[in-house]
Amino acid sequence: MSTRRRHIILGIAVAMILLGFAWVVRPSGEPTSDGRTLTQWMAKLGSADGDENAHAFAAIERIGTNGVPFILPRLGARDSALQFQLLALVQRAPFLDLRFSTPSERRQKATVALILAGEEAMRKSMPDLIRLSRDKDSGVRLTAVELLSTFPFNDSDPLPALRAAQADPDARVRATAQQTAGSRNAVGQEVQRLRDLRPNQPHGANSRHGGPGQFDRVGMAAVAHAERWPSLRT
């Protein structure tokens, strides 16, 4: 048997052992919907089958906050050289038809799942997202900062973590945090401008905005909406 073939067989054996171990230690009590676990529905996210993908969206929405303890560990999935080597070995044996997701793919699906789980799930996850924004793995930090960037403009809790991320050693993390800061500043300026258009101002005040009485229910609604804007993406 050639050395290359032995390496492939050894790599596949290790991969199967790791897969079996992950199955044994998987969390118990995982929430289900329509007869499938959260993990099974998350695996369907991004499916080429539109109906299956839509079904996964709806199922994860129904699971809601119950899924948070099972989503968070996936957000912290770290890249490692060993995992990439195992994936490379498995790909050299296509006859086995094995499919392993990368840590990056797991984080992406967990991100979608957390957003689908709803606003309460996001709020419940914030302390963990702040912790993950300081993780040693740059991919984990980027995922956390991207999620923290989606919180409403008037929510100040993510701000310290987002400010710290602007000095992150990874350029992708810095860029995401800086873009969010710029968007929040722009929204803040617009909210202040709308607030300046107070109703019942003396005649002639703010005439450049159309004179008195122009800040009516529409203007008030605009302020309320602006204060709820997530960070804007450009």
Image: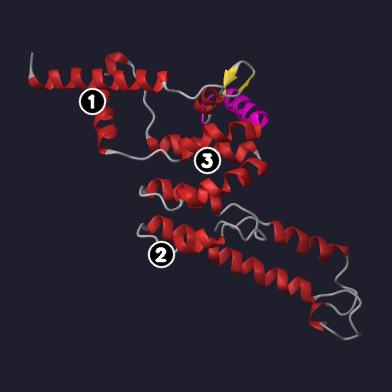
Q: Could you give the CA–CA distance between mark 3 and mark 1, rounded to whole angstroms? A: 28 Å
- On residue 31, which mark appears? none
Q: Is residue 49 magenta?
A: yes
Residue 234 at what x, y percent from top left? 54, 58
Query: Residue at image x 55%, y 52%?
Result: 148
User: Which residue was labeled with disc 3?
Assistant: 111
Name the mark on residue 167: 2
Amino acid type, mark 3: Thr
- SS for tag 2? loop
The residue indicated by pointer 1 is: 89
Question: Element under label 3?
Answer: helix
Question: Residue 164: percent from the left, percent from the top?
Answer: 46, 63
- Mark 2 crowdedness (10 Å alpha carbons): few <14, some 14-19, many ≥20: some
Decide if residue 225 is on the left or right side of residue 168.
right
Residue occupying image coordinates x 36% and y 26% = 100
Quarter placement of the N terminus = top left
Q: Earlier in the sequence, mark 3 or mark 1?
A: 1
Residue at left 61%, top 15%?
Answer: 35
| Main SS category, magenta section | helix
Q: Amino acid at mark 1?
A: Leu
Q: Report the magenta residues as a range.
A: 46-63
**Mark 1 nearby-residue class (10 Å; few <14, some 14–19, many ≥20):** some
Q: Is residue 22 left or right of residue 42?
A: left
Q: Are marks 3 and 1 in contact (CB under 8 Å)?
A: no
Q: Would you say 189 lies left or right of 105 here?
A: right
The quarter of the displayed image where residue 217 is located: bottom right
Element at label 1: helix
Q: Is residue 171 above or below residue 104?
A: below
Q: Would you place residue 96 above or below residue 112 in this image? A: above
